[in-house]
Amino acid sequence: MRAVGSGPRNWRVHGWWQSQQPLLKRHWFKVSERDYGFYNHIAAPQARTLLNDDKIWQSYFKFTFDRNPWDRQVSWYHHRYRHNATPPPFSTFIHSDRRARINNFGIYTIGERVAVDFVGRFESLEQDLRHALAQVGITFEPELPRAKGNFRKTGKHYRDYYDDETRDIVAKWYAPEVALLDYEF
C-alpha cells in the first residue's frame, strides 16, 4: 500500500472490476498518449476516437469530476511546488508559471460541449461517486481515501491566497466550469 499523498493509486484495477491484474498489463490501457491507448486523464475526443464506434460511445455511461477552480488552483500550486522549501508567491505562480492553468473542461468536453453524462463535484465526491456508480449498477460503500490531501501545509482557506487580480484571472481561465457548475469564489 502506498502512503497518503504518494501519487496516483489508479494503476491497479479496483475490486468492482473483479480483477487483480494491474491496468498497465491490460492490452487496452496504456501509460500515455504516445502508447496509442487509453491513459489516465484521457480527453473525451481521444477516448471517443479510440473506441472507433459511436454506438459504443453513446451506450457507455460517462462521468467525471471537477472542482471549484479557485480551490483547485491553490491545491495545484501546493502540489506543483511541494518539493520547494520556499515556493514563489501564489500570485507569481498564477502570473508566470506556464503550467499554472489546468484545462479540466477540455478533458470532458468535445467542441466546448459536455461529452459526459454526469459531472460530479469534488466538494461532494463520495455522494456524487455513489450516484455515478449507481447508474451502472455498482454499489459503493467504502470511505474514499485522501490520496493527495497533505500537500497544503497551511490551514489557510483558498480565498486567502487571492487578490482581486488573481481571482479574476482564474475566473476567466475557468469561465466554462464556473458557469456549468455554478461555482463562486
Image (cartoon, rainbow, N blue to C red):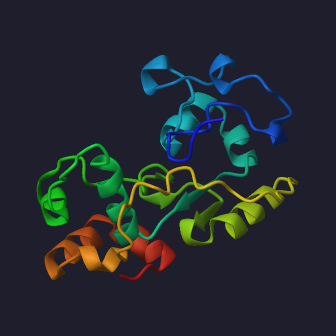
Look at the picture and state if 117 lies above or below 46: below
The one of 182 and 78 positioned closer to us in this rendering: 78
- Residue 14 in sight: yes
Name the residue: 26% across, 69% down.
Answer: 170
Residue 4, percent from left and from top: 56, 47
Look at the picture and state if 65 lies above or below 81: below
Residue 45, percent from left and from top: 49, 41
Look at the picture and state if 59 lies above or below 171: above
- Residue 176 in sight: no
Residue 167, percent from left and from top: 23, 76
Name the residue: 54% across, 33% down.
Answer: 49
Residue 39, percent from left and from top: 54, 31
For the N terminus, the image quarter is top right
The one of 10 and 170 positioned closer to us in this rendering: 10
The one of 78 and 20 positioned closer to us in this rendering: 78
Quarter of the image holding residue 15? top right
Instruction: Name the side, left or right, on which 73 lies relative to 9.
Output: left
Name the residue: 33% across, 62% down.
Answer: 73
Instruction: Name the side, left or right, on which 26 lies relative to 101.
Output: right
The one of 168 and 71 positioned closer to us in this rendering: 71
